[in-house]
Image (spheres, helix red, strand yellow):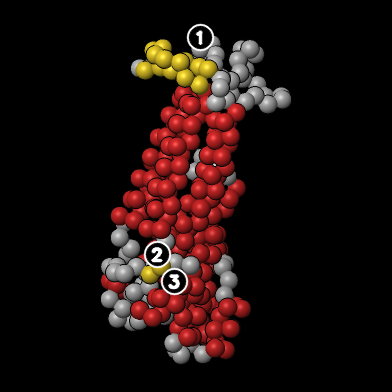
Amino acid sequence: MIERYNTDEMESLWSQENRFRTWLEVELAVCEAWMKEGVIPEGSLRNILERAEIDQERIKEIEATVHHDMIAFVTAVSEKIGPDGRYLHLGLTSSDVIDTASSLLMVRSLRLILDELELLSREILSKAFRYRHTPCMGRTHGVHAEPITFGFKLLNWYEELRRDQGRLHSALEVMRVGKISGAVGTYAHCPPSVEERACDLLGLARAKVSTQILQRDRHAQVIAALAILGSGLERIAQEVRHLQRTEVIEVLEPFYEGQKGSSAMPHKRN
């Protein structure tokens, strides 16, 4: 992610440290589900929950030898737990943890985006009402056509953003699933009841069927929804850019106190 255009929340969400934290979140949910099955003693679960922690340096050290990130992670966390660490990763394959954690990260990311999109939509709707009687020129193919109002233009933007919100909500629900079905998804070493309990603890639905992984059409739907949103935001940005051209000068982008537009041309505002 480009730091200049990133947010603290999104950067923190996708940091390496939080990636490991989310893996641990999945592992602990599975341990709790195994306890409900009577496989992990309640005292052992308490010990696991109290002692499990992330040591990134130790994970790197182990991975340098085993060349497997999940084995390094499980080994490092198990060392912190002690003898009860043997229950960590019970019945699981790496993709159970990685894909379920990825679902959590993507769902949380989409919620951040939806929150920001809601703020943008409300602001555009507010401006649409404010400028509902402000005349401006409607254009087709960039050429003057018929008069419209600036509020009407903004209302079109608002409606598109509402559709974007609908697509993102749909993609979020498709992505809001976990997979705790073991190697190749057969439940050979982990019953569906453990998957159901663990996913419920994580706020996820369980995948009705999976292989070694969660099918990637789910991820593709998220990417498609984000791509459509991005193209719409780009269209709005290009329209603002066009309307503030010197030859048009119908709108101006915000310009804050102390802001500079050019190192060579002080009159510029973009």
Q: Residue 199 carries which label?
A: 3
- Residue 54 in percent (x, y) is at 56, 68
Q: Nearer the viewer, residue 55 or 222?
A: 222
- Residue at the image position 72 percent from the left and 25 percent from the top: 257
**Residue type of the residue flagged with mark 3:** Cys
Residue closest to the eye, 197 or 16 = 197
Q: Which residue is drawn at 46% across and 80% down?
A: 33
Q: Where is residue 93 in the image (x, y as percent from the top left)?
A: 36, 72
The disc labelled 2 sits on which kind of residue? Val
Quadrant (top left/top right/bottom left/bottom right) for the C terminus: top right
Q: Name the residue under label 1.
A: 247
| Position of residue 162 measured from the top left corner of the image (x, y, whole percent) | 45, 42
Left or right of 265? Residue 84 is left
Nearest the viewer among 186 and 58 is 186
The residue lying furthest to the top in this view is 247
Residue 224 can be seen in this image: yes
